[in-house]
Amino acid sequence: MNCPLCQSPSNHFYSQNTREFYFCSTCFAVFLDNKNYFSEKEEQKHYENHNNDIFDKGYQQFASPITNAIQRDFKPQHQGLDYGSGTNSVIVKMLKDSAYHISEYDPFFSNTISLLNQQYDYISCCEVMEHFHHPKKEFEKLYNLLLPNGKLYCMTDLFDETKNFDTWYYKNDHSHVFFYHAKTIAWIAKTIGFSNYSIEGRLILFEK
């Protein structure tokens, strides 16, 4: 099976009941066989069942690496986009509480296509990139949505050789279809054309 990101031939990596995962030795990603993807209706129903309480202090703390980094790098008057905002965006709530201008886009719940015809100083993408069925196309889109010198803030749980995939909780969410290694992030930055990137825990920053 070819890797959805770099299109390199990839090898079978792991089986979980009927779910099959593959490993790409070119970009170091692990990904789910597309035959195991949710249908669009199943995926939306799955997201509707997420408990996204934007007033929950624990949820706000979870998202704070992104909001803190945005507030460090940009001022309220800069234009932002929360890409993959879900049913309720805690990032939008937290930044708007600090008078930031940020819009939210989600293909299921806030599908305002006109937002994808604009460009932004910064984009947040919190716990979204692991859901990408077509990661290269998505990162190309995100790159093009950024203004010159713009920044893309992502959060996900990276996979590496120290983790036991069999017991790794992150693969057990059936809407998680693509898992990134630090080398995958480097491949994306170089191939898509980002000028720089950094990884700090779960926070990944791409700079245009």
Image (tube, grey):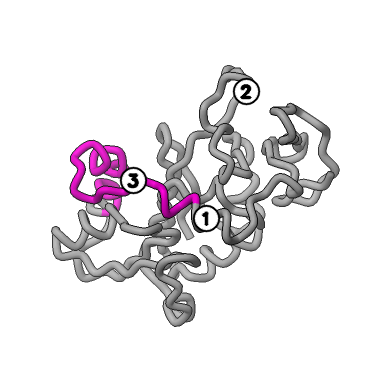
Can you tell which of label 2 and label 3 is closer to the viewer?
Answer: 3
Q: Secondary structure at mark 1?
A: loop
Q: Which mark is residue 51?
A: 3
Q: Residue at x 62, y 44 (%)?
A: 177
Residues at discs 2 and 3 in contact (Cβ within 8 Å) = no
Can you tell which of label 3 and label 1 is closer to the viewer?
Answer: 3
Q: Secondary structure at mark 3?
A: loop
Determine whether 53 is above or below 26 in the image: below
Determine whether 62 is above or below 42 in the image: above
Please say whether residue 59 is one of the residues in the magenta stretch: yes
The mark nearer the N terminus, 2 or 3, is 3
Q: Amino acid at mark 2?
A: Phe
Q: Which mark is residue 165?
A: 2
Q: Amino acid at mark 1?
A: Ser
Can you tell which of label 1 and label 2 is closer to the viewer?
Answer: 2
Percent position of residue 51, x then y: 34, 45
Q: Secondary structure at mark 2?
A: loop
Task: Give left or right: position of 90 versus 166.
Answer: left
Residue stretch in magenta: 46-70
- C-alpha distance separating marks 2 and 3: 25 Å
Residue that mark 1 sits on = 195
Viewer-closest of 65 and 15: 15
Viewer-closest of 207 and 132: 132
The mark nearer the N terminus, 3 or 1, is 3
Q: Residue at x 49, y 35 (%)?
A: 157
- C-alpha distance separating marks 3 and 1: 36 Å
Percent position of residue 111, x then y: 45, 73
Disc 2 packing (10 Å; few <14; some 14–19; many ≥20): some
Viewer-closest of 1 and 122: 1
